[in-house]
Amino acid sequence: MNSKMKNFAVKSLSMLATAAVLLVANPASAHSGSDKKPANGQVSVKYTGSNSKTVVFRLNFENTTAEKFWLIIKNDAGEVVYEEQFTDLHFDRNIYLDVDETKIKPTFIIRLKDQDIERKLLVTKRTPTNEGTAVVL
């Protein structure tokens, strides 16, 4: 074996060994981007209106990992009033809550296998004297 071939073989083995060490030292880089957790900003809840018995919200969730998630809604007392599992990639729904009170503080939770994303609002329903308001808590 001449010296050029020997140098090429040594350099090739050296590069392979370096790549293997880097891959073992940082296994996260070997995974695809699908392991990323959804960001907190990928969930939005907007108050869209009310009438004498119902309050309506628009909930958007960009489920970039396309994994199963739970939508959980709790009332002022922290009791679960709605719970359902979804797998939508682009979840965009109107949520109707039947309420008798003028002011409510619902909590919307997107629950993934290892993460909860919460949105809390303070809502004053529409009455004959006001249009209704919502404040993000």
Image: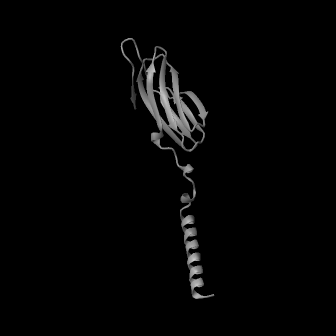
Q: Is residue 43 left or right of residue 113?
A: left
Q: Quadrant of residue 22?
A: bottom right
Q: Nearer the viewer, residue 20 or 11?
A: 11
Query: Where does residue 107 sit, x and y in percent of width and height?
Result: 48, 30
Query: Where does residue 9 sit, x and y in percent of width and height?
Result: 60, 80
Query: Which quadrant would the N terminus be assigned to in this image?
Result: bottom right
Q: Nearer the viewer, residue 13 or 44?
A: 13
Q: Is residue 71 above or below residue 33?
A: above
Q: Residue furthest bottom?
A: 2
Query: Where does residue 88 sit, x and y in percent of width and height?
Result: 58, 36
Q: Residue at x 45, y 40 (%)?
A: 41
Q: Residue at x 49, y 31 (%)?
A: 59
Query: Where does residue 33 sit, x and y in percent of width and height?
Result: 54, 51
Q: Nearer the viewer, residue 75 or 126?
A: 126
Q: Quadrant of residue 28?
A: bottom right
Query: Which quadrant would the C terminus be assigned to in this image?
Result: top left
Q: Residue at x 51, y 36 (%)?
A: 61
